[in-house]
Image (cartoon, coloured by chain):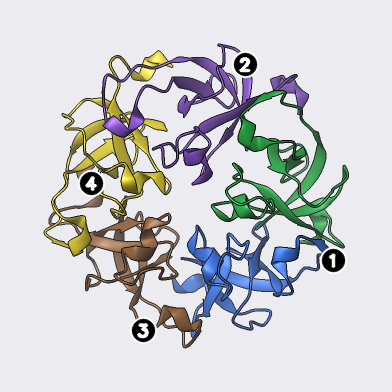
Chain colours: A yellow, B brown, C blue, D purple, E green
């Protein structure tokens, strides 16, 4: 799993029905990095450092079997900073 | 999910039967970036910023179980621009 | 799906039984780019621009359920050139 | 499988229930490389060079069918160093 | 599938039970490139140019359903060299 920081949210009104209403968060993997969108079943806040799971595991990790996600937050890191590595 | 912009369409007459007639859109992840082709079950227009799902989730997200896709549009962003990040 | 150009074929006599006798084509994603090998269930010729499907979808797209492929040609583009993007 | 070195651990108290209590280790693929987080079903120590499995195989490799992982340690290398390659 | 050259073997005594005793080979995708480890169900020798399958297909390609691999050799190329492309 890669470590990301939550930077905001996105809204997509016109989306496939399977996506339902799960929160979609913007995340970045370094300060100012290209934004990605992750499904959030945990309840994160802006600034949280999170672990995201990709690949086929991203689907069930949302809590909904077969959910259409390729990036899902699976946990918030208790302590982290870009300089921690 | 990654954020892409729709730039056009492609046509492939000679294709495998499993692909059926779903629309295939050209998308780019930055202005002038390398084009990719995404399956569109949503109904997008040129210029739309969209979320695309890859990995195994791209298949069912088309609305057809087991469809041969590795990149499928799952939603149109209400508001986005390259500078939004 | 990514866009590739067919540049030739490869032969692998000593291969796992599951691979059977499907054609294996060399493809490149830009002129002179690193070659990749794609399974061809469509019947392509050298110079064709093709769409290839990766991820788990590459397997069934060959027409044989569970075929060992991570890159399979799913269609030939009617019109394309590197400069088209 | 890629070769990684174990550099430490991470703690995520607020995580999805499916993650249970498996150890999460920080790994790097070169000295000072970007850290990734791998699930450890083997019992590794800091400094160990390990093989990690990604893709859908990362799930069952944890020993728990369908576990939400996209990077799982599957073995410790008996002998390795960055210069070994 | 990507083309790799076999450069040696690795040994991992302490590994998960699911890995059993299949040979693990070091492969590189260009001279002096970063080494990866591939499962070998074919029987390759150092110097062989091989096709490796990744993604979920890497698992069954080993010959053992659900084997924990994300990179498996599926064939030896009859004729290849880095300059062949």
Crowding near the residue tagged with mark 3, few <14, some 14–19, many ≥20 C-alpha atoms within 10 Å: few
Chain assignment, label 3: B
Separation of residues labelled 4 and 1 (CA atoms):
52 Å
Residue C14: x and y in percent read 84, 61
Q: Position of residue A16 (x, y in %)?
A: 20, 64
Are tags 2 and 1 found on a single chain? Answer: no
Disc 2 target residue: D48
Q: Residues within 10 Å of mark 2 (few under 14, many from 20)?
A: some
Could you confirm whether marks 2 and 4 are on the same chain? no
Answer with the quarter of the image where residue A48 lies: top left
Identify residue for label 3: B21
Residue under label 1: C13
Q: Position of residue C74 (x, y in %)?
A: 52, 75
Separation (CA) of disc 2 from disc 3? 51 Å
Helix, strand or loop under label 1? loop
Secondary element at tag 2: loop
Q: Is residue C52 left or right of residue D21?
A: right
Labelled disc at residue D7 = none
Between the residue at mark 2 and the residue at mark 4, the CA separation in whole angstroms equals 42 Å
The relative height of residue E52 versus residue A82 in the rendered view (above or below) is below
Residue C62 lies, in percent from the top left, at 58, 73
Please determine whether, in this image, residue D41 is positioned above or below residue C17: above
**Tags 2 and 1 touching, CB below 8 Å:** no
Q: Are discs 4 and 3 both within one chain?
A: yes
Is label 2 on the same chain as label 3?
A: no
Q: Which marked residue is nearer to the observer: mark 4 or mark 3?
A: 3
- Among the two numbered marks 4 and 3 on one chain, the one whose residue lies closer to the N terminus: 3
Q: Secondary structure at mark 4?
A: helix
């Amino acid at each position: 799993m890669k470590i990301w920081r939550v930077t905001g949210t996105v809204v997509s009104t016109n989306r496939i029905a399977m996506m339902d209403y799960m929160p979609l968060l913007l995340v970045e993997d370094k300060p100012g990095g290209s934004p990605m969108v992750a499904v959030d079943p945990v309840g994160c806040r802006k600034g949280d450092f999170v672990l995201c799971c990709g690949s086929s595991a991203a689907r069930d990790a949302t809590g909904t079997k077969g959910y259409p996600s390729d990036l899902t937050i699976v946990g918030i890191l208790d302590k982290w900073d870009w300089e921690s590595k």
